[in-house]
Image (cartoon, rainbow, N blue to C red):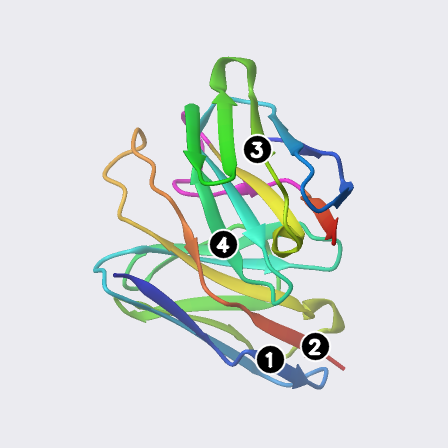
Amino acid sequence: GIQVEQSPPDLILQEGANSTLRCNFSDSVNNLQWFHQNPWGQLINLFYIPSGTKQNGRLSATTVATERYSLLYISSSQTTDSGVYFCAVEKSGRGSTLGRLYFGRGTQLTVWP
Amino acid sequence: SQTIHQWPATLVQPVGSPLSLECTVEGTSNPNLYWYRQAAGRGLQLLFYSVGIGQISSEVPQNLSASRPQDRQFILSSKKLLLSDSGFYLCAWSATMRDTRDSYEQYFGPGTRLTVT
């Protein structure tokens, strides 16, 4: 398999603050996705970012595949940003299961008004 | 646009009873389909995946099984539930992958919360 480690495990912020979530992975990947799990359990796609940088509103993400990490930036956080943020990767190369995503344990983000 | 449905949304079942969870995808054809389970403590684990009708691969040995009777339908079943089967079950789809060099974004359904009592 492949190890996916996310940090920090928990993060508490006041509304308006910025934050950076990190995802480290142990092997080469074809695919890296960031998800937000809302209080109802729905996994919402944030970014599909096997390499490079993308931005979507207040959120942006950067993946440095050669150094095996990805960062998710949340700026001007809002209470609706609360929830669990997951990083998931698909291992590349021979012997890997097509499309199988390996998930980290997530970062629980709580934003207070 | 593509949508993915799961039902039921919640389910409470006694130990030893059978299980059938259904997942359907609309707006795409020949998708890859996946069943994941999320136990308490957040981590998601892949249970089954399918690249076509009748083609099922299992990632984790357990008392669960999966079937794909139609192109866009994926079913998770059990003949006798165990307490350890409790959890949040998520179905996902992605576009068909042509070979091992391609990779496509996965999209998840709303999930089924199963409690085995």
* Coordinates of residue A40 in the picture (x, y in percent): 61, 67
Q: CA distance from mark 1 to mark 2?
A: 8 Å
- The chain to which mark 3 is attached is A
The amino acid type, in three-letter code, at marker 2 is Thr
Query: Which tag, 4 or 3, sits closer to the chain's start?
Result: 4
The mark found on residue A66 in the picture is: none
Using the rendered view, name the quadrant where residue B14 is placed: bottom right
Q: Few, some or many C-alpha atoms within 10 Å of disc 3 (few <14, some 14-19, many ≥20)?
A: many
Of marks 1 and 3, the one in the foreground: 3
The residue wearing badge 2 is B115
Residue B44 in the figure: left or right of residue B42: left
Disc 3 target residue: A72
Q: Work out whether residue B85 or residue A68 is closer to the camera in this orientation and state it.
A: A68
Query: Marks 4 and 1: in contact by CB < 8 Å?
Result: no
Front residue of B92/B47: it is B92
- Tell me whether marks 2 and 4 sit on the same chain: no
Eye-nearest disc, 2 or 4 = 4
Question: Where residue A18 appears, x then y in whole percent?
Answer: 66, 34
**SS of the residue under disc 2:** strand
Report the span colored magenta.
Answer: A91-104
